[in-house]
Amino acid sequence: MPEACPVCGQAYEPEPGFYWGAMYFSYGFTVAIFVISGVLLYYLANDPPLWVYISVVGGAALLSTPLVFRYSRALMLYLFGGVESRPPVA
């Protein structure tokens, strides 16, 4: 990962340990994935056995890990890193 954005020069890590707070966002995303997967299984699969819940919910959490990691860091950067969305200058 580069140190800064090649287009605008925004530092991806404004200070050491900046992304420790992103763990809270990641936790929230993962809990949402667990709850949504469990509720969908309960209603769509007619309350399957426990091993199905563990397999599907665990698989969904593992498969979504790269997205959760990326979006939690991006959310942390946008909310607390002073990043503003600016259109590129032509």
Image: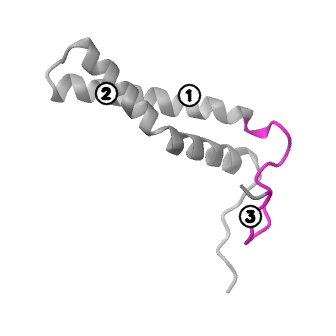
Is residue 51 on the magenta stretch? no
Residue beneath disc 3: 5
Q: Residue at position x 27%, y 15% from top?
A: 51
Q: Amino acid at mark 3?
A: Cys
N-term-proximal mark, 2 vs 3 = 3
Q: What secondary structure is found at the residue carrying circle 1?
A: helix
Q: Amino acid at mark 2?
A: Val
As rendered, which of 68 and 84 lies closer to the eye?
Answer: 68
Tell me where residue 29 appears, x and y as whole percent: 50, 34
Is the stretch drawn in magenta largely helix, strand or loop?
A: loop
Name above or below for residue 87 compared with residue 64.
below
Tell me where residue 69 appears, x and y as whole percent: 58, 41
Are dots 1 and 2 in contact, CB under 8 Å?
A: no
Q: CA distance from mark 2 to mark 3?
A: 37 Å
Q: Nearer the viewer, mark 2 or mark 3?
A: 2
Q: Amino acid at mark 1?
A: Tyr
Q: Is residue 18 left or right of residue 75?
A: right
Give the crowd class for mark 2: few <14, some 14-19, many >=20 residues within 10 Å: some
In magenta, the rendered stretch is 3-19
Q: Residue furthest top?
A: 50
Q: Residue at position x 48%, y 30% from top?
A: 30
Q: Residue at position x 76%, y 69% from top?
A: 8
Name above or below for residue 49 compared with residue 30.
above
Residue beneath disc 2: 56
Residue beneath disc 1: 27
Q: Is residue 43 left or right of residue 72?
A: left
N-term-proximal mark, 1 vs 2 = 1
Q: CA distance from mark 1 to mark 2?
A: 18 Å
Q: What secondary structure is found at the residue carrying circle 2?
A: helix
